[in-house]
Amino acid sequence: MERAQLDITLSAEALSLGETVRTHCPTCQGSDPTLTITRQEDGSVVWNCYRASCEERGGRGGHRIHSQKRSGQRKQKFTPYSGDLRHLTDEEMADLEERIGWTDDHVHIARPRWAEDEERYAFPIFDPIGVRRGWVLRTWDEGKLIMSPKTLTRMDNEQPHMSWYRPRPTRDLWVVEDIPSAVRASRYVNALALCGTGCGPDYALEIAAHQNSVVWALDADATDQSIRLYQKHRALFEDSRVQVLPCDLKDMPEDELRSFIC
């Protein structure tokens, strides 16, 4: 273990569960206390230096801080999608517009395809610089866009299962639940789809590496989870807040969505 990480680990040992401390960074050794260390409720630790020139950030899992990983933790598995994909037809484009309000602009942002063998929409999952890291295959069920029980998120690599949409240098990043909501929001702000409601230390650290201010805005029925994520990860960001939604962002009329976000 490097000396800097050893110092951070030793500092974390003194923290109670759920406690955060702000201190001097042993890596950049700046004059200001720019390093935050948080020991989370499960005993894991995340840390992040806010100095622009410093890249010190990381996390350790486990109920014992000095252990390198949680007991029994398995390496994440991934399965690339290998089926045939094609561009959407005019009929499929019209279907997306009718159901979730997508226009040509939204399709340009999301770049969806049609998975022939699955007969489902395939939404690419993008990393922070716009490189595809996997696919989410979705279909309709009683008018709602859902994750089919027959398919899983198909990943090309072992990166976090979340998709970035950063068309402009806005200060805030809206963290939402699914790709349709993120694409709708990204016409006005930077947006991130968690592709679910979970956000562990590895997800949170990737977010913190690219954005200092976040708005937790999961679907309307997941406000409690937004609050939990805010409380769990707030030490990683200079600014963060929870946005209570009257309905899912993907279901808002465009004028209402614009005024709500802006």
Image (cartoon, grey):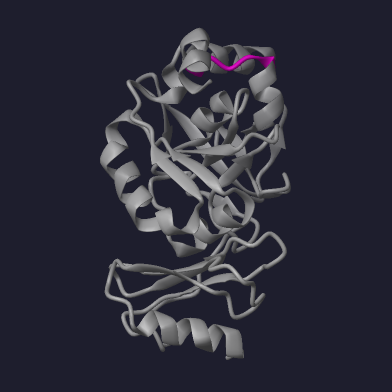
Q: Which residues are magenta?
A: 100-104
Q: Is residue 68 visible?
A: no
Q: Would you say 220 lies left or right of 53 here? A: left
Magenta span: helix, strand or loop, mainly? loop
Task: Please state which of residues 238 and 111 is positioned toward the viewer in this rendering.
Answer: 238
How many numbered discs? 0
The quadrant the N terminus occupies is bottom right
Q: Residue at horizontal 29%, vertical 37%?
A: 223
The image position of residue 216, as x and y in percent, is: 42, 40
Q: Residue at horizontal 49%, vertical 81%?
A: 8
Q: Quadrant of residue 71?
A: bottom left
Q: Quadrant of residue 244?
A: top left
Query: Is residue 251 shown above or below 186?
Result: above
The image position of residue 18, as x and y in percent, is: 29, 66
Query: Is residue 31 shown above or below 188?
Result: below
Task: Please state which of residues 116 and 250 is positioned toward the viewer in this rendering.
Answer: 250
Query: Is residue 154 shown above or below 39?
Result: above
The image position of residue 112, as x and y in percent, is: 65, 31
Q: Is residue 103 magenta?
A: yes
**Residue at the extreme front:** 31
Q: Is residue 63 magenta?
A: no
The image position of residue 118, as x and y in percent, is: 55, 38
Q: Residue at horizontal 73%, vertical 48%?
A: 131
Q: Would you say 217 lies left or right of 191 here? A: left
Q: Quadrant of residue 3?
A: bottom right
Q: Residue at horizontal 42%, vertical 45%?
A: 196
